[in-house]
Image (cartoon, rainbow, N blue to C red):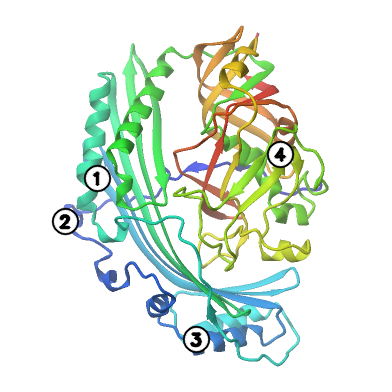
Amino acid sequence: MGSTISRRKFLTDAAIGAVAVSFLPSFLKFNPTDAYAGLRNAGSIKEYYERFNVTDEMLAKVISEAMAKGGDYCDLFFQHTISNYVILEDNQVNRAYSNVDFGVGIRVLKGDQTGYSFAEDITLANMQNAARTAANIASSGKLILPVNIKEKKTRNIYPIEIPWDKISITDKIPLMTEMNDKIFSLDNRVIKVVVSCADDSNYILAVNSEGAAVCDFQPIGRISATCTAESGGKKESNSSNVAARKGFELFSKENINFISNDAVNKTMILFDAVKPDAGEMEVVLAAGDSGILLHEAIGHGMEADFNRKKESIYSAMINKYVAKEFVNIVDDALYPDLQGSINIDDECNDSQKTYLVENGVLTSYMHDKISAKHYNLNPTGNGRRQSFRHIPLPRMRNTYMTNGPHKKEEIIASVKNGIYCENFTNGQVLIGPGDFTFYVKNGYLIEDGKLTKPIKDVNIIGNGPQMLKDITMVADDFAMAKGGWNCGKGGQSVPVSMGLPTVKVSKITVGGMKK
């Protein structure tokens, strides 16, 4: 395939893998967003202009500077993010992290080439300096007429009840403690519990040389619990989390109960788990969390930059069959509340629901502005970036397979000897050809059409595009994963979600016990 993309660690659980620092007890009484009280809950373009202290006149001057050397297009991406992370461990809150990020990124496009610079101190002089740096991607001067900036209206698919930046750490502690106590109460083998809460309040303003100005508030919350238990001299550990574009209402009774029960159940079953025999066998992917395999082993290969550069196995597969006719794959920005949902992408493009595979045929890639121009198409709203310090890339949002014609029970009954995979932890993917190795944390043996013994410590090894071809049955029990994930690509990380109905793959290599 000519791919130079190296293997990489796949998705990391966003609710667990954050940086935390020690703090003094008095910190519990300090809300780091108090200094930003006047910047909360902006809704109109005027309020966002006030947030970033900019005017139409200033923006027009910066855009003119960015385009002065002959660029084809430029955009300004303003971002103000308030982030908090709290950990309760050993029955007390002992770590926390808070951060306020503020700045603007300026991008200039010339053909397929990108010039980029950013400023953390938003003044006209700083923005113009950054614009000159980004403008260097082009080399021919031309007359730049002042841009007429107009607000572009957007939808709101994630209304919230209680913004994260209106509460303090002291509001979270009682609910985190409640979850901690519940997990201990569910099973006397529990010896340690770690509860964490991460939240972002992300305000963005994007303006481009086409005259569009758009603003969006993108909240996100993640609540997680890790349970460690001991039985018969053995220790086992597992975790559960819920993530969504919601506010403090994410700490609902329903979610506290789900996370607590899920973490305990997934931990305790490991004491009875076995390893299956190694070898190639039928594999059934459970509805919901197994969508991670779809995302990593297949989804990345359908991002347009990998195809534009001929690095993906799908680069010559548009309008060709890549799966059975009952397989449909979607990347959907409009799914309510999910953390991969966005009202707009980071290039001012409207979000949408994009069918990648329809009735087994590859019908579309996921496009940003550059790839859409290359293919002479409209962007699909997949231009995303980690922050104002990064350029946008074609990235997934909520990627899932839709319901099929089969029943879960029918699928399991059709398997004589195989495994049923419920959730995954670690894995690696070679994005170009789609070769993968994933670690199955929880699952079951399937023997003579029935789920029997639980399994653990199992690797599955295969190729994503081949696995897609080898899907022989798809159930009608579609579910999205409740948890939150951060997806890494090109040194950037963005929140995503994924889902799947129960799916049968005719053959995948399972690395269990040697026969």
Is residue 474 among the parts visible in the rendering?
yes
Residue 373 at what x, y percent from top left? 74, 66
Query: If you read the primary sequence from the N terminus, does the residue marked by circle 3 or circle 1 appear first?
Result: 3
User: Residue 26: which numbered mark, if any?
Assistant: 2
Residue 3 at what x, y percent from top left? 77, 48
Label 2: state its secondary structure. helix
Above or below, 372 relative to 86: below
Which residue carries the number 3 mark? 56
Amino acid type at circle 3 is: Asp
Please report contact status of discs 3 and 1: CB closer than 8 Å, yes or no.
no
User: Residue 434: which numbered mark, if any?
Assistant: 4
Q: How far apart, in angstroms, are the residues tagged by discs 4 and 3? A: 46 Å
Q: Nearer the viewer, residue 333 or 433?
A: 333
Amino acid type at circle 2 is: Ser
User: Residue 94: which numbered mark, if any?
Assistant: 1
Above or below, 457 relative to 91: above
Label 4: state its secondary structure. loop
Mark 1 surroundings: few (<14), some (14-19) or many (≥20) residues within 10 A: some
Identify which residue is drawn at 72% across, 84% down.
70
Task: Single out the mark in the foreground, 4 or 2.
Answer: 4
Q: How far apart, in angstroms, are the residues tagged by discs 3 and 1? A: 46 Å
